[in-house]
Image (cartoon, rainbow, N blue to C red):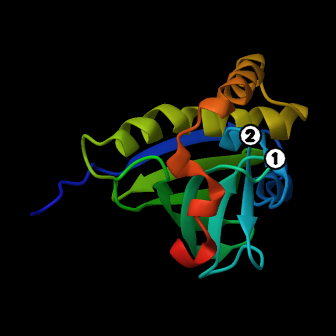
Amino acid sequence: MTTELAEKAVYRVHINAPIEKVWSELVKTDEVLPFFFGAVCNTEDGLKVGAKIAMRTKDDKYTSVVGEVLEFDPPYRYSHTLKFTNMDDPYSTVIYELSEKDGGVEFSLTTLNVPAGTKTEKSMAQGSPFIINTLKALCETGRPTLSGRLMLGMISLMTPFTPKECLSKNWPYEKI
């Protein structure tokens, strides 16, 4: 059986901030990341090629996304595989690229190898604009947009309804 893959999707935004600021926000670990829907990027030994990553709730109870770092080239490029823990879809790839442009940073988020017509494709298409726009607001103003803050509040309220398959105990690094 062959799985049809969606064409790559590219989301771009210009961020009025130094590249070092954008990069440092993007790659924070062990701290809530508003642009990643309030998740904390956990690793065993920091972000580097081959590192397993798990996007977890602040209390570490739930894991929403898992993957492995494929590229890590500060402050220009970072890519990793991605799998939503509540979906049966296979891993796909996300690439973040930063380049200095017009006194700021052109930031792009590219998705690759996303199976066409899947829940993962739909989630990535809906979530990617939120990610880039919230990262932009955070880097430029120090906080997410009002709509971003409202979304983060809704996510917090919905946490008790998170599916059991997303429990972090089901996603140890050896399983990722």
Is residue 98 visible from the viewing direction of this image?
Answer: no
Quadrant showing the N terminus: bottom left
Residue located beneath label 1 in the image: 32
Residue lying furthest left? 1
Closer-to-camera residue (52/157)? 157
| Residue drawn at (51%, 41%) of the image | 11
Residue sitting at the far right: 142
Residue 110, percent from left and from top: 48, 52
Which residue is rendered at x = 50% and y = 50% of the image? 165
Q: Is residue 93 above or below residue 165?
A: below
On the picture, is 121 further left or further right than 166? left
Residue 42, position as x, y percentages in the image: 73, 63
Taking 167 as reference, is 124 above or below it? above
24 or 126: nearer the eye? 126
Left or right, residue 45 beside residue 66: right
**For the residues marked 1 and 2, what is the alpha-carbon distance in whole angstroms?**
5 Å
Circle 2: is it few (<14), some (14-19), or many (20+) Cα within 10 Å? many
Q: Amino acid at mark 1?
A: Val
- Marks 1 and 2 close (CB-CB < 8 Å): yes
Is 152 rendered above or below residue 5? above
Q: Is residue 92 left or right of residue 172?
A: left
Q: Amino acid at mark 2?
A: Gly
| Residue in the foreground of this view, choosing between 100 and 53 | 53
> Relative to 159, is 84 on the left or the right?
left
Categorize mark 1 by other alpha carbons within 10 Å: few (<14), some (14-19), many (20+). Answer: some
- Dot 2 falls on a residue whose secondary structure is loop
The mark nearer the N terminus, 1 or 2, is 1
Look at the numbered disc 1 and give the secondary structure of its residue. Answer: strand
Residue 86 in percent (x, y) is at 46, 47
The disc placed on residue 38 is: 2
Residue placed at 52% from the left, 73% from the top?
175
Say how many tags the image has.
2
